[in-house]
Image (tube, grey):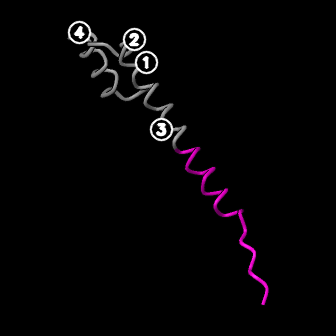
Amino acid sequence: MAEKSKSLLLPMMAAAVFAGLGRMVVQKIKADRAARETRVAGPVDDKTRQWISDVVRTPRQ
């Protein structure tokens, strides 16, 4: 009886998926570090916080 040939498709697809997920995780970590260093969303003063609260609570007309 001849040996059954194994397909390499499934292991290759699994490797590609894991590589893609790993790449996404690395990009997310780098983006978080960059955002933390630039402090895009910094501390908000009380006047600005009150204005945002009023805008969010007031319905549009």
Q: Nearer the viewer, mark 2 or mark 3?
A: 3
* Residue 20 lies in the magenta-colored region: yes
Res 53 quadrant in image: top left
Task: Judge by depth and name the residue closer to the eye, 60 or 12.
Answer: 12
Residue flagged by tag 4: what amino acid is it? Answer: Asp
Res 20 quadrant in image: top right
Mark 3: few/some/many CA within 10 Å (<14, 14-19, 20+): few
- Alpha carbon separation for disc pair 4 and 1: 23 Å
3 and 4 marks in contact (CB < 8 Å): no
The circle drawn on residue 52 is none
Q: Nearer the viewer, mark 4 or mark 1?
A: 1
Residue beneath label 2, please?
Answer: 38
Residue flagged by tag 3: what amino acid is it? Answer: Val
Disc 4 or 1, which lies upstream in sequence? 1
Task: Give coordinates of residue 6: x percent, y percent.
Answer: 71, 72
Q: Quadrant of the N terminus?
A: bottom right
Q: Nearer the viewer, mark 3 or mark 4?
A: 3
Q: Which residue sits at x=37%, y=29%? A: 59
- Alpha carbon separation for disc pair 3 and 1: 14 Å
Instruction: Using the image, determine if residue 56 lies above or below residue 3.
Output: above
Q: Which residue sits at x=60%, y=57%? A: 14
Residue beneath label 3, please?
Answer: 25
Task: Judge by depth and name the residue closer to the eye, 47 or 45.
Answer: 45
Residue beneath label 1, please?
Answer: 34
